[in-house]
Amino acid sequence: MTSEPRRLIQRRTALALGASCLGLWGAGCRGGGDNAPVEGDGDDAWHVHPGQSIQAALDRASSATDGRRRVVVHEGTYRPERPGQALVWLNRRHDGITLEADGPVVLTAANSDIADRDTASFPAVVNHVVYFGDGISARTVFRGFTITGANRFDTRSDEPGPIEPNRPELGKQNLLFFYCDGGGMKIFGRSYPRIEQVEVTANVASPCGGGVSIQHLGFQQDAVRISDSIFRGNRCQVTGSAIDLLPGSRAEITNCLFTGNVANTGPDTVSPPGKPYNARHGSGALTVFPGSRIRATGCTWTGNWNGVDDKAAANHYSRSIFWQNTLDGGISPEGRYELDIVDGKNVKGCLIGGAIADLRGTIDAETNTLDAPDPDFDESFLPRCPAYQGVGYRPVKKPLASSSREH
């Protein structure tokens, strides 16, 4: 990759820290201490401050009879107080809740005070930072957080309680994906949250989905919607370093930045012996498996170990930037690519430039630019080059929570 994108990545990274009957049991931990969240006098929110429990606030909001279904988390870092499957979880009972940050709020999987220093997963003590389970509709909003610290922690204990009440009969591989994929966020079953203005950074997962894993199990009635967000410095052993769409999943990604993410950091322990997935060139920051659906609009992929690999049909990529996704760090033997897409007919209005722009030769050069000029990114990855007007990610300033003060 060119020196300028590499310098930008280094600087920014340094600044950042199916089933027909669903029901899978897991374990979790509380986000903070046992102190009760504050019920705002005169607004419609539950307020959480450092030392208080985000999960307790979510549970209270889910059973509130006065319509208070907003949880506002105030500035600070929130970490697990005990090992479990997630720091924060939302399932059917939490549908319709808005969970939003007021100021800089970090949700982390790490707690070095209780983690085992002799394990490879140190200092993480939860599988996923945030879990969205079966029964979550688009009425559920998650906004404004930094998600970090996942590091291949794996517990299958049911203590202290279930994060997923609806349990399907899953095969061994799907169980592996449920517990181990999605270090930053795991989205499972009929789950279609709206995720807005988040930064998913420095998470590690094995095998897949360092940042986010989406596992809809074929339930594609709706899509996960991710907008105005940043995926930076996430890693995984096999596929989808930033976002991994398992077969039969669906997502819409709008105005998102992907940079510094690395897949293929180790051997493929999931595929049949001797048949590793994407064996020659490896996987991208975004992996889309067969049977999944995605629509990506106005996004930027730059400085990753590969851009996007997509083996599904007729997916849409529009007005997006793919630039020098040539980062080192994986083990695949052959060169880096911008797009490895089986069906490229709906790739339109994209500017693409890198070592290998179009790995399979499926992208229309008349409706896209395959030899794009240098975008000349600034510190926030806004392209200065005039050719990129209206194309790619644009930074969005995070607003304060819409009702952040307590009266």
Image: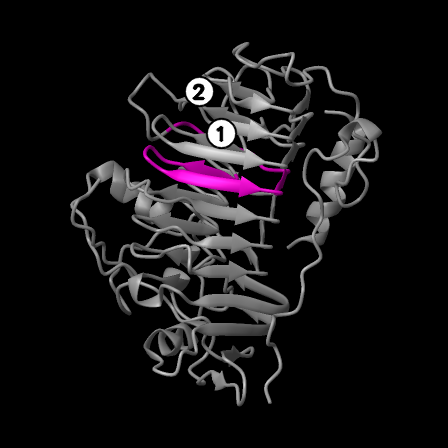
Looking at the rendering, which quadrant does residue 90 occupy?
bottom left
Q: Secondary structure at mark 2?
A: loop
Q: Nearer the viewer, residue 29 or 407?
A: 407
User: Which residue lies most toward the top here?
Assistant: 361
Q: Is residue 265 visible?
A: no
Return the x and y of residue 175 as percentages of the image width and height.
26, 44
Query: Any magenta on residue 347?
Result: no
- The reply to whether discs 1 and 2 touch (Cβ–Cβ < 8 Å) is yes
> Does 16 sit above or below residue 115?
above
Distance Cα–Cα, label 1 vs label 2: 10 Å
- The earlier-in-sequence mark between 1 and 2 is 1
Residue linked to disc 2: 278
Q: Nearer the viewer, residue 98 or 37?
A: 98
Residue range of the region highlighted in magenta in the rendering: 242-268
In the image: residue 323, left or right of residue 82: right
Q: Nearer the viewer, residue 193 or 246?
A: 193
In the image: residue 331, left or right of residue 249: right
Mark 1 crowdedness (10 Å alpha carbons): few <14, some 14-19, many ≥20: many
Residue 264 badge: 1
Q: Amino acid at mark 2?
A: Asn
Q: Amino acid at mark 1?
A: Asn
Q: Nearer the viewer, residue 271 or 337?
A: 337
**Foreground label between 1 and 2:** 2
Return the x and y of residue 206 as percentages of the image width and height.
41, 40
Return the x and y of residue 233 as percentages of the image width and height.
61, 43
In the image: residue 52, left or right of residue 365: left
Query: Any magenta on residue 248?
Result: yes
